[in-house]
Image (cartoon, helix red, strand yellow):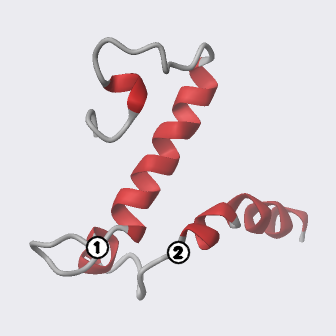
Amino acid sequence: MRMSMRPFTRLTNGFSKKARNLQRALAINFMYYNFCRRHMTIRTTPAMKAGLANHQWTLHEIARLPDLAATESAA
């Protein structure tokens, strides 16, 4: 994670001034790592290997998550 996210590498000014924005960036990174990125050793995503997902997610699906949560809570 440290090498894939700019705020965690050394000697950078690419950091978030708000803790909430950093929290959101971490959440997106973890979602991508576990649901979208296919790992070479297990030949699938960690979420599929753990039985949490039945397919490899796309970035479009992750981007739609806040919209889906808002419609479910309104219903």
Disc 1 marks a residue whose amino acid type is: Arg
Near mark 2 (Cα within 10 A), the count class, few <14, some 14-19 or many ≥20, is few
Query: Residue 33 placed where, x, y %?
Result: 35, 58
Residue drawn 38% across the image and 36% down it? 5
Camera-nearest residue between 43 and 11: 11
Residue drawn 42% across the image and 86% down it? 55
| Residue 5 position (above or below residue 27) | above
The answer to the question of whether label 1 and label 2 lie on touching residues, with beta carbons closer than 8 A, is: no
Q: Most extreme residue toward the left, as rendered?
A: 41
| Residue 6 position (above or below residue 26) | above
Q: Is residue 33 left or right of residue 21?
A: left
As helix, strand or loop, the secondary structure at mark 1 comes to loop
Near mark 1 (Cα within 10 A), the count class, few <14, some 14-19 or many ≥20, is some
Q: CA distance from mark 1 to mark 2?
A: 11 Å
Quadrant housing residue 68: bottom right
Query: Residue 40 placed where, x, y %?
Result: 15, 72
Disc 2 marks a residue whose amino acid type is: Thr
Query: Residue 37 placed where, x, y %?
Result: 34, 67
Camera-nearest residue between 60 and 55: 60
Q: Is residue 68 left or right of residue 61?
A: right
- The numbered disc on residue 73 is none
Q: Most extreme residue toward the bottom, as rendered?
A: 54
Circle 2 is placed at which residue position? 58
Query: Residue 11 placed where, x, y %?
Result: 32, 11
Circle 1 is placed at which residue position? 38
| The N terminus - image quarter | top left
Quadrant housing residue 8: top left
